[in-house]
Image (spheres, rainbow, N blue to C red):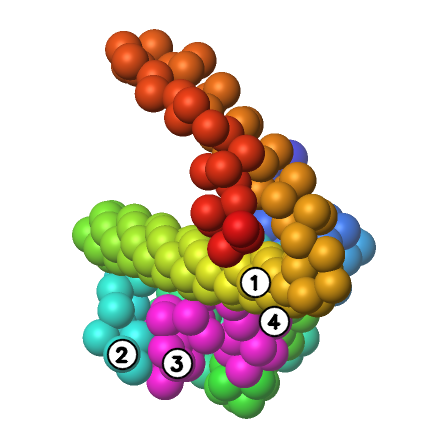
């Protein structure tokens, strides 16, 4: 066998080695012939022309996870919040994915960032912090059309975290503390007001009851005087007995007092009582 034969056999072996391609499951390879798109190799064994054809791109057909980094977003009411997201995409048109955009991963990541800023920028702070589902739905809708032009399908978009910036958190904490203090002051003032009202009502009710008691006592005294007056008209002895009894009680009270030094007793007690009632 000549040297030329050895060279020819070697070239054939090399051609076969380079021409045989085994594409693994979960990938698709783009081949070009003379610099032009020639086709897509699906998973399995393939034989290509190693001279005029080459594998230019290897693209995964699995779901791709794009982590969108945290960024500052200004809301409609000029509050600064931090938000990040994660997108799940899949390559469905491999030729568009490799020829329609230079780097579809970076393009989708930037698209999610800009769309997220736009959506949150149209919301107030409270809306942005409490509307994750709304933001997620609007974000997916905003990037879906562009993704289709690049041969991609947006499977899902999730908001990983959305929170106020550090300065905003401090401002919100100060605002919450001021609000709690205001509520405490208002509550204390309301309590003092109710206490004053209840005290005033209690004093008014006590005065009313005292007046009623005085009226009842006055009526009783009037009835007693009327009764005594009627009795005196008919018989002075009853009046004399009543006045004498009270007169004696008064003298006893005076004599029992610690401040009393001298108690003067009338010599004629009966006469003194008769003089009170006008008796002879």
Between the residue at mark 4 and the residue at mark 3, the CA separation in whole angstroms equals: 14 Å
Disc 2 to disc 3: CB gap under 8 Å: no
Query: Tag on residue 133?
Result: 4
Q: Is residue 227 left or right of residue 108?
A: right
Residue beneath disc 2: 77
User: Which element carries disc 3, helix, strand or loop?
Assistant: loop
Q: Position of residue 53 (x, y in %)?
A: 55, 68
Counting other residues with Cα less than 10 Å from the Cα at mark 3, is it few (<14), some (14-19), or many (20 or more)?
A: some
Question: Is the magenta region chiefly helix, strand or loop?
Answer: helix
Question: What stretch of residues is rendered in magenta?
Answer: 113-139
Between the residue at mark 4 and the residue at mark 1, the CA separation in whole angstroms equals: 80 Å
Residue beneath disc 1: 218
Disc 4 to disc 3: CB gap under 8 Å: no
Q: Position of residue 171 (x, y in %)?
A: 22, 55
Between the residue at mark 4 and the residue at mark 2, the CA separation in whole angstroms equals: 21 Å
Mark 4 vs mark 3: which is more N-terminal? 3
Q: Quadrant of residue 259?
A: top left
Mark 2 vs mark 1: which is more N-terminal? 2
Q: Is 120 part of what is drawn in magenta?
A: yes
């Amino acid at each position: 066998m000549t040297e030329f034969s050895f060279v020819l056999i070697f070239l054939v072996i090399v051609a076969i080695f380079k021409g045989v391609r085994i594409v693994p499951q979960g990938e698709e390879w783009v081949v070009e012939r003379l610099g032009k798109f020639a086709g897509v190799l699906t998973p399995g064994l393939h034989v290509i022309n190693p001279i005029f054809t080459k594998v230019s791109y290897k693209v995964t057909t699995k779901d791709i996870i794009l982590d969108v980094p945290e960024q500052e977003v200004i809301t409609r009411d000029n509050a600064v919040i931090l938000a990040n997201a994660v997108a799940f995409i899949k390559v469905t048109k491999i030729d568009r994915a490799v020829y329609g955009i230079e780097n579809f991963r970076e393009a989708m990541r930037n698209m999610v960032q800009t769309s997220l800023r736009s959506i949150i920028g149209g919301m107030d702070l409270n809306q942005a912090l409490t509307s994750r589902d709304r933001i997620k739905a609007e974000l997916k809708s905003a990037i879906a059309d562009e993704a289709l032009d690049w041969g991609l399908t947006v499977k899902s978009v999730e908001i990983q975290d959305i929170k106020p910036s550090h300065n905003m958190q401090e401002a919100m904490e100060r605002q919450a503390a001021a609000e709690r203090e205001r509520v405490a002051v208002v509550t204390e003032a309301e309590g003092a007001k109710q206490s004053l009202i209840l005290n005033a009502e209690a004093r008014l009710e006590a005065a009313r009851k005292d007046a009623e008691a005085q009226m009842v006592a006055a009526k009783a005294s009037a009835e007693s005087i009327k009764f005594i007056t009627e009795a005196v008209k008919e018989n002075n002895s009853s009046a004399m007995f009543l006045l004498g009894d009270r007169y004696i009680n008064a003298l006893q009270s005076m004599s029992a007092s610690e401040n009393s030094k001298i108690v003067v007793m009338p010599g004629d007690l009966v006469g003194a009582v008769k003089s009170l009632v006008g008796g002879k």
